[in-house]
Image (spheres, rainbow, N blue to C red):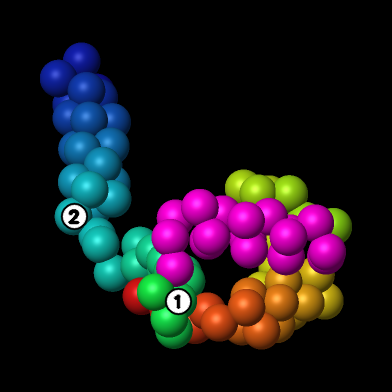
Amino acid sequence: MSTQAIRNFITIPVLAIGLAACTSTATNPAKQYDVWYAKEAKTERDYKLDQTQCYDAHEMQPGQPVALDSLSFEGYRDCMVAKGYVLKQY
């Protein structure tokens, strides 16, 4: 087998796989964003205070990943709802 044939034997499948990976967007899940909206007018300071109180009450840390079906998140969500917020998901 010639050097050119071996190079083609290796190069063509590698390029085909790379191209398929770049063009396939169906397997990339859409990102979901959760946004809290206040039912009544609140300032950014009010929001941060309310959020901090709800985090602290349920032993959560801002930015820490938490499962949406966990008791901590459910308590946090209930706390925010009780303070007048609605969770919107996009």
Relative vertical location of residue 52 with respect to residue 18 in this rendering, above or below: below
Q: Residue at x 83, y 64 (%)?
A: 57
Q: Quickly name the residue at label 1.
A: 38
Q: Quickly name the residue at label 2.
A: 23
* Numbered disc total: 2
Question: What predominant SS class does the magenta segment belong to?
Answer: helix
Q: Secondary structure at mark 1?
A: strand
Is residue 48 covered in magenta? yes
Q: Residue at x 23, y 53 (%)?
A: 20
Q: Residue at x 50, y 52 (%)?
A: 45
Of 31 and 25, which appears nearest the observer? 31
Asked if residue 47 lies left or right of residue 51, the reply is: left
Q: Give the residue type that dot 2 points to.
A: Thr
- How far across and down, in percent of the image, does residue 87 sit? 50, 79
Report the quarter where the N terminus lies. Answer: top left
Magenta stretch bounds: 42-58
Rendering quarter of residue 11: top left
Q: Give the residue type that dot 1 points to.
A: Ala
Asked if residue 39 lies left or right of residue 64, the reply is: left
Of 66 and 61, which appears nearest the observer? 61
Is residue 61 covered in magenta? no
Q: Residue at x 55, y 82 (%)?
A: 84
Q: Earlier in the sequence, mark 2 or mark 1?
A: 2
Q: CA distance from mark 2 to mark 1?
A: 40 Å
Rendering quarter of residue 29: bottom left
Q: Secondary structure at mark 2?
A: helix
Q: Nearer the viewer, mark 2 or mark 1?
A: 1
- How far across and down, in percent of the image, does residue 16 sit? 21, 46
Report the quarter where the C terminus lies. Answer: bottom left
Relative vertical location of residue 88 with respect to residue 14 in this rendering, above or below: below
Residue at the outermost left position: 4
